[in-house]
Image (cartoon, coloured by chain):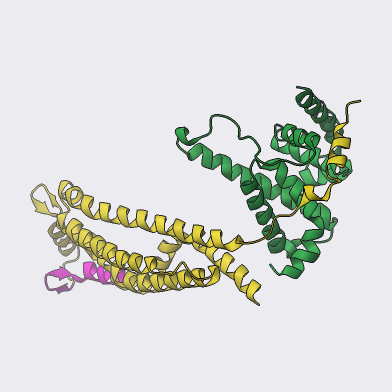
Chain colours: A yellow, B green
Amino acid sequence: MEKSIETIWKEGFIKNDALVAPKLNDLYNQKSIDIVEKFKRMYKINRIAIIAFAILIIPLSYITRMIYMGVPMSLLFIAVTFVAQKFSKQLDTIDKNTSSYEYLSSFDNWVKDMIAVNSKLSTFMYPYVFIAVVVGFWFIEIEGNILGNMLTSGIISEFPNTFIVSGFPILLLIPFFLGIAILAFFGGKIGKWDINLVYGGILNKLRILLSDMEELRK
Amino acid sequence: MSSDFYTTQILPYAAIIIKICRAYTDTQEDFEDYYQEVCLQIWRSKDNFKEQSAWSTWIYRLSLNVCLTFLKKKKNNKQNAPSDLLPDEVLVDSRAFDDESLNQLYAAIRQLSEIDRAVILLYLEEKSYQEIADIIGTNTNNIGVRITRIKERLKKILSN
């Protein structure tokens, strides 16, 4: 008589060797390597994107007649790529022949260093970008006139009593320097937010994995 | 994960995990990955166990969730992979139990939909309709009919 599926199931598992649990080994090793490799890939793509943008922004700014913005921005992105490249070389020196925990800890320290340097740079970088954008717009030519000069004349004619400092009305200088000050103050935080936006998911996985491994070591 | 936790809280229920992971994998390598991931998730989520159900029921639910999530990820990866890297046909299970009927039954179970696999595994493990419904997240009314339909399907596959 044909066996029912219930009987096949019961009889099949009577033999103990049918249910031998695999050994739990190497559990974290592969996960550690996966996380670091994934981060490396993302970091490389990010560097390529930045350098591509540094190159593309020159013709783009020429087309949009904002070359005074394009050149400094391009220089900035090249500098950022240079710093990222240096960090990438450091990342390659992390010793894989240690335990998973030591490997991930070294990677975590590298991430912390990278974020710290990036935050410091951001306090200069964001005001620099702001200045480049303002200068870019300032020198845009509209029907033979420079936008900045048109703006200055407009303000002077509207507010004839306004203070003029080195040829610039104070009503323009105040928001300009305020913008720089705000970006310098919050630059570090914006930098961290930016990193979190790109690498947040993977860095979160790293923290969870490290915390698991730390608990294991207790 | 401490070896104590593994020995006392997971190993006694390893049979459950093995049976479920077997139903959702085709190769020994995948099976070991799924098994390890289930163990890891049990350990990570142990504080979320509220004793509203039996520990074994909770392990069933967690094992199924992990397997279904893994399977979904695997499918997504396959969809993203270039078509020339995909196998032309469904992978043949490289593992075998000593009992040939059990091998055939597992092969048939693997042909079912993911949820049907879960339902039949729980049924074969003699879980009540209520427990199956709780684990799957459906109501008890559908379970009986569904099991009958799955059993018929399995019989058909096995007879072929």
Is residue B37 left or right of B126 when viewed as pictured?
left
Quarter location, residue B118: top right
Asked if residue A113 is positioned above or below residue A209 in the image, the reply reads below
A118 or A1, nearer to the observer:
A1
Vertical position of residue A190 compared to residue A64: above or below: below
Q: Residue at x 60, y 70 (%)?
A: A213
Q: Is residue A104 visible to us here?
A: yes
Q: Kindly give the residue lying farthest to the left in the view shown.
A: A144
Q: Which x, y percent locates residue B71?
A: 62, 43
Q: Is residue B124 left or right of residue A140?
A: right
Q: Is residue B16 visible?
A: no
- Quadrant in the picture for the C terminus of chain A: bottom right
**Foreground of the two, A182 or B71:** B71
Quadrant housing the N terminus of chain A: top right
In magenta segment, residue B11: no
Q: Position of residue B9 (x, y in %)?
A: 79, 63
Q: Position of residue B74 (x, y in %)?
A: 57, 43
Please check the rendered image and state whether residue A170 is part of the magenta-colored stretch, yes or no.
yes
Q: How many marks?
A: 0
Where residue B123 appears, as percent x and y from the top left, is: 85, 40
Taking the image as shown, residue A204 lies to the left or right of residue B15, namely left
Q: Nearer the viewer, residue A50 or A36?
A: A36
Start and end of the magenta stretch? A163-179
Outermost residue, front direction? Answer: B98
Q: Is residue A184 above or below residue A69?
A: below
In the current view of this chain or complex, which residue is farthest to the right?
A: A1
Relative horizontal placement of residue B105, taking residue A70 as reference (left or right) = right
